[in-house]
Amino acid sequence: MIDFAFLADAFSPATLFAIVIGTSLGVVIGALPGLGSVVGLSICLPFTFGMETVPSLALLLGVYCGSVYGGSISAILINSPGTPQSAATMLDGYPMAQRGEAGEALGWSTAASVLGGLLSCIVLILAAPQLARFATRFGSVEVFALILLALTCIAAVSRGSMIKGLAMGAAGLFVALIGTDPVTGAARFTFGIEFLTAGLDLIAVVIGLFALSEAFSRLAEPHGGAPTVANARLILPRLAAWKGRVVNLLRSSFIGCLIGALPGTGAATAAFISYASAKQASPRRDEFGKGEPDGLIAAESANNAVTGSAMIPTLALGIPGDVVTAILLSAMVVHGITPGVRLMSEHLDVVNAIFVVLIVVNIVMLIVAFPIVRAFGKILSIPEPIIMVGVIVFSLVGAITVRGNALDGVVAVLFGIAGYLLRRGGFPLAPFVIGLVLGPQFEQNLRRGLLLNEGDILAFPFASWIAAVIFTLTAVLILAGPAKALLPKPGPAESGRQ
Amino acid sequence: MMYRSHHFISTPASLIDGRRRVGLSEPLIVTQLRAAPFLVSCGFTLLGAVFLVVAFTTGGGRGNLAAGDTPDALPRILLFAWVGLGLADILRQAVGSRTSSPATNGDPAEGVRDSSQGSALAGVMALTLVLSIAIVFAGYLLPVLICLPVILFLTGTRKAMPFAAAFLLLGPGLWFMFHHILGIRLPILLPGGLL
């Protein structure tokens, strides 16, 4: 028997208000080139601390989904993707705008985004409970193996080398262990500093690594003034115009859902893969890249379909697939919800409310898109340095309000500077944050597993068939990189033909 | 990739991504290209090595590699992984730079920075750090009133109206919103006081 009490939370005035504000902010943040979902979530986090659990998550989910869609506005109107997820949208969106069909292009992207997002909500609602039910079979060894697999996946697909990704993952796990040991109470790597006995605050570190380092990077490489766009209007496509395009929408949404559920892949990958597959399948493939609506539908439905399915491993297993879901999980921690394989069984009301909120966010996105597109020219006229200084100030405020400790602001700035340098060194930041989020779980399950297996870590892969499968997958992923490097590379003539 | 060609690197006043290149000689540019990621890798590994030394000089296991299920066991394993992978990355870069030709290694635009822009960024970073430390001792409002105008100036905001609007909104405006509208207290200088 389903308890529908969660609907009262999901449709409370506070939640609906948070959805409208969050989605609007998300679309604006996504539309501004350079400010993606992670920066948006980081600067909106402090506003959620005084809120109830469901409205605070509604605000963050609104920012997340809105920012993924918002990137398409600048991709279409100024040929500059607001977020990396919208890079594929640019290929057909901007040529349409150049032909004087900007309104139609925005209409296709909005409709595809909303429909892709809604389809992914359905997949999330159907798949997450099944996966969560299966996850109840997981013991300590299986959870440990799963965290190891997630980190390896994220390191393998991260930008830059896998070695750097794995090193960042190890560093993130290590930093998570700074503070008091939960079993013995011994202080670890605190150097006698009282502030460190509680460990480093996850949100302060994330704000520093992503929001502050992004602001520093943008200030280091100013991108100049964006061209002014005046009086853009959004024109939704008529029903008849969808003829012959629905299959493309469904296929692209499915690709987005599938890729979104895999750790570390993300919306940009989904958008490009579905764009390529739509191009292959379309009878109008020659028109792709010249302003073909099918290209827009493929890219936008896929990248928005990721938003729902990325929540599957997060809600069912407590394993965040990317930085955005890691921030959402950390927001849950602030509200007393512990991530893990029991998240759905212990907090079913919150998870059900999240399902409903995601559906409402996608519908609200359709409504708020109209005025935001009209105001886009004015939004773009804000000078980039002022926006970045705003990001710096909001980040500082966000970091110091999490625990009410001003020293967290210093931590955020130090990690911001480190994040900027690591970016310049080609180090992917996502494995570090995922390691940081999963560190305590990783240690807890490792030590419990060692107790159960008489201290023999080599017995872990043989603990159960689930553990064996997960460890095998992890080994394959780790070995795939060096194996690929050993394969003979195509000669210049061969590569030139590709 | 045209901009990676030898000819492009030796042209001092070329344009890359809309930015004017400063007149640097080719070997210096190539050195800069390699230096930044290599130095970052070295720093990253060195930090891990420092923690590793600390891990073996303090704590329960104290120098014992087989410390067993102590609070220090997992951190040590992770530090070994951190330092080991860091060294592997340094080695990979060193070998890579020896085998690849100078002109095709890295993006030239990445390595070249306008020096004034670089110092402005360093100034912004330093001021942000000073601001965050000052907030610990003097509360939020006073330090932000002093540091914010300087940060805005350093980032190139010179026009009076945008400067004033940004300062008022991001400084006292934000403080007022958090304190009086959202009810979230920011650090204060005087307990229960205005500042």
Image (tube, coloured by chain):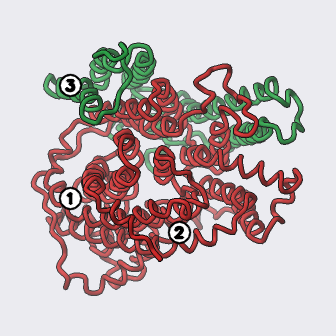
| Spatial CA span between label 2 and label 1 | 43 Å
Q: Nearer the viewer, residue B160 or A160?
A: B160
Q: Is residue B53 left or right of residue A169?
A: right
Residue A329 coordinates in the image, percent (x, y): 50, 51
Question: Given the image, what chain letter belongs to the residue carrying mark 1?
Answer: A
When asked about the image quadrant of residue A268, the answer is: bottom left
Question: Given the image, what chain letter belongs to the residue carrying mark 2?
Answer: A
When asked about the image quadrant of residue A93, the answer is: bottom left
Mark 1 lies on a secondary structure that is: helix
Q: Amino acid at mark 2?
A: Gln
Q: Is residue B53 visible?
A: yes
Residue B118 coordinates in the image, percent (x, y): 41, 24
Can you tell which mark lies on residue A226?
A: none
Q: Amino acid at mark 3?
A: Leu
Q: Amino acid at mark 1?
A: Val
Classify 10 Å Cα crowding around label 3: few (below 14), some (14-19), many (20 and above).
some
Can you tell which mark lies on residue A498?
A: 2
Query: Which chain is drawn using red?
Result: A
Q: Confirm whether circles 1 and 3 share one chain.
A: no
The answer to the question of whether label 1 and label 3 lie on touching residues, with beta carbons closer than 8 A, is no
Q: Is residue A485 visible?
A: no
- For label 3, the residue is B168
Vertical order, B31 against A239 (above or below) = above
Q: Nearer the viewer, residue A129 or A44?
A: A129
The first of marks 2 and 1 along the sequence is: 1
| Spatial CA span between label 2 and label 3 | 56 Å
The answer to the question of whether label 2 and label 1 lie on touching residues, with beta carbons closer than 8 A, is no
Q: Nearer the viewer, residue A120 or A304?
A: A120
- For label 1, the residue is A368
* Colour chain B appears in: green
| Spatial CA span between label 1 and label 3 | 28 Å
